[in-house]
Amino acid sequence: MTVPGRGSPGVRRSVLDYPKKRRNTRRFIRNTEPAALDMDWLDQVKWANDGLVAAIAQDAVSGAVLTLAWMNREALARTAETGEAHYWSRSRRRLWRKGEASGHVQRVREIRLDCDNDAILLRVEQAGGIACHTGREHCFFQRLEGDRWVSVEPVVKDPQAIYGHG
């Protein structure tokens, strides 16, 4: 699927290409396309110069913030297409499906875009009750107390048992 490009009429581009003004930035995305989705909505997201947008995962029932991750166009498109959260790993420099190694899949119930169009909110059902790679319910388990960060949430499952490595 292609959508009209920006600039001169008749120019077509892959749905997962960067907008024209960012063509000289690093490409973090592949030019593969999810099927059967109208992709105009992707152009409404204000992607950062690196092609990413912040994505907050929130428990759809409790409202608890589970994690903050990053998405590129492909991750957001695949999330919408499959109903499971996909993110861009900045450290591994690749697309990944949440839970692909741990089994802690995030089933997406709703996707929202903030008022500035530069942040995504995923309202999710968190499989296994663990969203964090540290084995905790969510990633925001450290609280500032005075001048230091203190872990205030328990480990639900040892990461060694989840991933099989240290």
Image: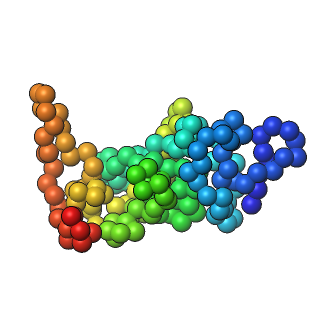
Q: Nearer the viewer, residue 17 or 128?
A: 17
Tag count? 0
In the picture, measured across the screen, residue 40 lies left or right of residue 151, that is right
Residue at (76%, 51%) from the top-left corner? 13
Residue at (25%, 45%) from the top-left corner? 140
In the picture, measured across the screen, residue 146 lies left or right of residue 17, that is left
Colour mapping: rainbow
The percent coordinates of residue 63 (x first, y second) are 33, 48
The percent coordinates of residue 56 (x first, y second) are 41, 46
Give the vertical position of 88 relative to 97 (above or below): above
Within the image, what quadrant is residue 130 found in? bottom left
The percent coordinates of residue 150 (x first, y second) are 13, 40
Q: Nearer the viewer, residue 161 or 67?
A: 161
Give the vertical position of 46 relative to 67 (above or below): above
> Residue farthest to the right?
10
Q: Quadrant of the C terminus?
A: bottom left
Q: Nearer the viewer, residue 63 or 3?
A: 3
Give the vertical position of 90 relative to 96 (above or below): above
Within the image, what quadrant is residue 81 found in? bottom right
The percent coordinates of residue 115 (x first, y second) are 52, 33
Residue at (68%, 41%) from the top-left corner? 23
In the picture, measured across the screen, residue 159 lies left or right of residue 54, that is left
Q: Can residue 80 be seen?
A: no
Q: Can residue 101 be seen?
A: yes
Q: Quadrant of the N terminus?
A: bottom right
Residue at (81%, 50%) from the top-left corner? 12
In the picture, measured across the screen, residue 64 lies left or right of residue 19, that is left
